[in-house]
Image (tube, grey):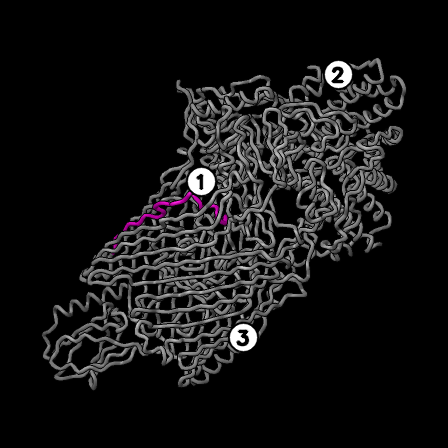
Amino acid sequence: MKNIKKYFACILVASATFVSCENQIFEEPYSSLSPSDIFSDPSRVEKAAVGMYDALQNPEYLGGRALIYADIRGIDCGNPTYFGDIPSFTSLNSSNGTVGLAWTAAYRTINESNLFVKNITANSGVVSAEKEKQFIAEAKFIRSLSYFYLVNLWAQPYGFTAGATHLGVPLVLTSSDAPFSPENQIPRNTVKEVYDQMIKDLEEAVVDLPASSATPTLSSVARATKGAAYGLLARINLYKKDYAKALEYANKVEALKVFQLNASPAEGFDTYITPENIFSVAHNGGDNPNTNHALGQHYAPTQRADIQIDPKYVALMSVTDLRRTELVKEANGAFWTAKYTRVSDWAPIMRYSEILLIKAEALANIASGVDANAVALVNQVRSRSKASTIAPATKAELVAAILNERRIELAFEGQGLFEFLRTGRNLPAHSVVPEYKFGNGLLVFPLPLNDVQRNPKLVQNEGY
Amino acid sequence: MKHKLLSLIFVLTCLIGAASAQERQVSGKVTSVADGTPLSGVSVLVVGASSATQTDASGNYSISVNGNATLNFSFVGYASKRVSVGNNTTLNVQLESDETSLEEVVVTGYGVRLIKDLTGSQSRVSGDKLAKEPSLSFDQALSGKMAGVQVGSSGGTLGDGVSVRIRGINSISSSSLPLYIIDGVPMNTVENTNVFNSGNGTRFNPLAMINSNDIESIEVLKDASAAVLYGSRAANGVILINTKRGKKGTTNIAFDSKTTFSRPAKMLDMLGAEDFMAISNEKISNASKYFGGVTEIARESDVDGDGIDDRTNWLDEVYRNGIGYDNSVSISGGQEKANYFGSVRYLDQKGILENNSLKTGQVRLNTDINPVKWLKTGMSLSYSKTQNNGVLTDRYVNGVTVSALQAFPTMAFSNPANSTGYNLGSNGYLTYGNNTRVVNGTNLVGGNIAHPYAASALQLNQNTPEQLLGNVYAEINPIQGLKISSKYGIDYLNNYEHQYAHPLIGGLGMSYNGMVQDNIRYRNQWVWQNYANYDRSFGVHRISATLGMESQFTKERQVYAGGNDFSDTFFTDLIDGTYTGAVPGTSEVMLWSGGTLFSTGLQSYFGRVGYVFNDKYLAEVAFRSDAFSGFGLNSRWGSFPSVSLGWVASNEDFLKDVEWLDYLKVRGSYGKVGNSRGVSAYAARTLYGGGAYTTLNGFSATQMGNADLQWETSKKLDVGVDFNILNNRLNFVVDYYNNDISGLILNATPPSTVGVPGGSIETNIGSMKNSGIEFTVNANTMTREDFTWTTSLNFTTVNNEVTSLVTEGADMVDGASVASVGRRLGTYKLIKWKGVDSQTGDPMWYTADGGYKTYNQADKSWTYTDADDVTSAVQSGVGGSDAQYLDESGLPKYYGALDNNFTYKNIDFGFSLVYTGGFSIYNSTRASLLSNYFVNNGSEILDRWTAPGQQTDVPKLYMTETAANQTSTRFLEKGDFLRMRTISLGYTFKDLSRWGISNLRLYGQVYNAFVITGYSGQDPEVSLNRNNTNIAIGVDNRSVPQPRTYTLGLNISLQ
């Protein structure tokens, strides 16, 4: 009896020894799907299209920081020390991690669009042809928008050399399956090539993008529409100083007859979805809580309060100007913008007032004298904010007035430094930052040292 | 136990009241030959008669006999003994063990081995050495105990993690922590239970959940031969923790009590109020042209309204004297067929930082039962729960050790006008009184300064980990020498993390009008092992073998929830209806919930065969085969073999006559093991995950996979010698090791322009070498009557060279440190500091071409001076391309320890020194203490340049200027140190057995008594391998100093 028990136990253990549990202990992921799971199902493909905007919302880039960098390197934010060497120029170098994160985030955003196009093309027919075209158009819009900030933050402006033959940024237009392949060591394209690509993408996209809406919705403001593509084309051409094209596209935005200025300049920053907002990167309390990168965190005195605004900016406006009374706050002994007050504020990429000012600037430059329509457009923007109207005597005065109006109207919306670069002006001394002459290499960001090391074809910007 | 005590009383009563019978009474004590411990439960019977008894708890017996009887003493595990009584009335007997395997055995992977048969490199430390130290977790107490094991001390924050490195750092991107096995079962590989702030918030080391009083011994498996049975997880070494078990025939009650008092061992020297004001005004005066001619910003204030100028020593406010109470009781014992060990511990500690405290309770029960001769079963079970009240410190913007260094000594601590009573402004940060914080739109402070005390007093950063660790096993012994075992173990590690931010404190609390974040982490792991061991001698041949399989499954779930906009500061938890969750200023609601879920599996087969001939020649081969679910489908299985040989030369005839040599063994091993620690659950796959864009659901790419991903491979060679000389008075262990690591899993970063999710792909691409010498000597230095002196010295060297990385010519960079091919891991690559121009007070650095650049602080411009001393204006300053490789690394070249223990009669005294050398520390704390912003500074700033001709290393001060403090060799310092780790003095009371006390020791200990170092910061060790970083190994950035701890302790054993 005793022996039987002994051998029984023996057999039990021995058999257990050779039973494999592999099937029980190797589980499929709970939290993710494979690319083939996504691109075989129409509803998942639609969500992958939304995912491109999630990538666009990258906190290091167009979720907010890209706009901030353009402004804190301009003249209206003093020298916000939270951002270290970025606003103070002198000690910024290619090892700066923050700059590296922004560069990486930009290409991450671009890759999400490229990857989407690649996957949807390979699985053509899963969604309707119409939707497929629309999603690809959205991908191109996102790519173009990402390149706009990339080329302006990391390369000298279009007008730096005749024909814009100076170095821009590498154009990456497909998603690589072999990330470590030497084929990915792409050299910098010229600024002209980058602008051409942005324009090509937008011109192709605008055909298939949904129409903009006079009764705006979340999707008509926070996703690409025809109006957003025309608007961005107008801006890009203005930066090229191709005033005819800038005018043409500004007119196309106008011709959509869906956009208009709100009664108050604060409205677009408060409720986000208004007829004035052409395109914004949306945020809410759901997808970006607790971030240190939100515009509201940096700009609002009640939040992290990293960026004050310069008293000289405030002095540009009369005390009754609504942009002074509604969009500037005084707290803790300093001035702050009230464009961003909450952690969930949207990043405003383009508003209708910018289109009016682009059109004004194009008209003013095309005309030989003082263009009356241009003056009217500037006054349209000023009147909305109850500012006094302008009556410039010369073309030069008009152009200066337009640039001044852009500085007031578009402040802290991501074009601060670009305004000087695109017009060939020196960056004036401000706060503790001395004057930087037009063309100084330090006015554009360094390429991250890590990338220059990994890709020997990348030529570093001058001065780094 | 009660029963035992009763029987003791009964026996004593018998002894006193008996002796009335006609028969003679014989009594005595039964002890063990080996160590003289009393044996209880020994059956004593009169041969040929029916009377019998058992020994009591103290080993005493008493039995009636007639005439010249013979007594038979029998007890399991011991040889029976018959003794004739003769005329004696007292008969003390010693029993000898009958288990041949009781020649000393040692726990190894999946079984025990005879020490003399070992061919691998394995070190041991006994548990009582660990329990004596005031460390919260046993791993920190391993410091200095063994050659080849380097333990970085955590700072003075309670529960902080400890880095343990066995024979150098054996990984770059993955974890290089060893595998921990408790009672034969692998533990969870969690280094920090906490997840908030990406692990840079409060940290908690789960190994602190183990009661170090429960540890019998720790074995460290260092080479391939010793560790190969752990295959893919053995490359960083394996630490076996063996908990205490009851001994047959004994009963023991032990009570350990410790009270600890601690102080920060060293604090930074900051400016006082007058110096601070003078320095601050000098900063702005020198730069006044950029600040509208302002020359005065620092002024006296009276914010607290007490009528005198505000003064606060912020370091005194955030540090305090810590105190701790640690009490534990254990009961252990055993009968013939069962033994048990049970313990309870309660610890209550207040740290050296204000508001940092911890309480922990731990219970354990270990039992073994052998109901029949061929079967043994048992279990080990422990449960532990801790309440840790953490404090945010370094690596956190509002951490108390950051803000306490920045806060002005002229600021008030209190402000009656604020409802909290603290000096907080409307933005929730310190207020500045009459100081000028903003000039021309520039914030001179560079941000806000959190109230160092209020930030931790009004807010919560708690975590409550719980761990249930246990295993059950059955072992059958069907034929002689063969044991078949099945063991099932669990490690349930749960952690509840709770963060509360007060609405009146700047940061999250004020942003969200009060905020709570909770995270619950469940990590459940089970392991099932089935294996057979065969050990048998046939004449001069001894064979041992192991064959088995193991399955491990780990599943982790995290559930996260939060809330904000609380109705009242009374509520600091998520209570229904007490918060709205509204985004402040809107009617929109925050989404404060989320979570993660993943699982991993590990399936393994292993085996080993050892052969010993004539106790002289030893040989062993072993293998393990593992499949891990995280790896790619192309490479899921890996094989790990090893071979080792040994020669006990002292057993050879030609050495038998060498008088001074008592023992000599030469051994060598070579094998291949792997490292998969830190590899994420689905690391090899290409994945799409959630990509919601506000209220639109979405999917976006989250990971680019690599189907070839597999373990890091470490080929380990070990050659060692063990020898004892001079009558075993000196015992030496010397090893040479060489680890050749290939297929390092690196987060290979393709050019950023490729835009892969996460920026990198885990790839087996790098390689590295570690080699060195380990040397240990244990000596009975002196033995006289009443006096003993023992000494133990160990010494380890670590040579390291990175041999390949992802992209040729591209280093992996982490701050000032790099992993660079052909260089030591953690080599510093820095711009070289030239010094301060004595004429202008401007800072200068060398450029890569041998010239130097000077930064003209007054007009913010740069000049370049070439090798021919020609100076010209240049556009840009020194940068990354001027950084040069230094022959200095954060990775120590050598380390070790020296222990001395003395006993004289009842007094024992000992001290333990540890030392580490051949490394440098980047003192980032020093750079921040020299800040040109309007913040407090370290006293070094008093050396700043003020007049032409002055020789100094601190440039002229300019408000908000950062160039001078940029990363350069200016802040690199030698880290070598010698620490008096412990000094202890004890007194043992003997002859208390009539009170039932077998041992009573009172002792006092000083931990971290002093440090001898040239390093100027707080502590050269605290930052070493912080957060287990493998590249930026030695960066000191405002960490909490190590405490100096005084312990008063009491051990009592009752038998």
Q: Amino acid at mark 2?
A: Ala
Q: Tell me what residue is drawn at x 81 percent, y 46 percent.
A: A135
- Name which residue type carries label 1: Gly
Q: What range of the chain is rendered magenta?
A: B1001-1026
Tell me the residue at 61%/50% (across/down). B812
Q: CA distance from mark 1 to mark 3?
A: 58 Å
Q: Which residue is mark 2?
A: A387
Q: Estimate how packed mark 2 is, as few (under 14), some (14 to 19) or many (20 or more) residues with alpha carbons within 10 Å.
A: some
Which residue bears the numbered disc 3?
A16
State the residue in front, A198 or B57: A198
Q: Say which quarter of the image contains residue A268.
A: top right
Q: Is residue B189 magenta?
A: no
Identify residue type, mark 3: Ala
Q: CA distance from mark 3 to mark 2?
A: 86 Å
Q: Nearer the viewer, mark 2 or mark 1?
A: 1
* Circle nearer the viewer, 1 or 3: 1
Q: Secondary structure at mark 1?
A: loop
Residue B134 in percent (x, y) is at 36, 50
Q: Residues within 10 Å of mark 3 (few under 14, many from 20)?
A: some
| Disc 2 with disc 1 on a shared chain | no
Q: Position of residue A19 (x, y in %)?
A: 57, 74
- Along the line of sight, which residue is nearer the eye, B809 or A423? B809
Q: What residue did someone put label 1 on?
A: B1017
Same-chain check, marks 1 and 3: no
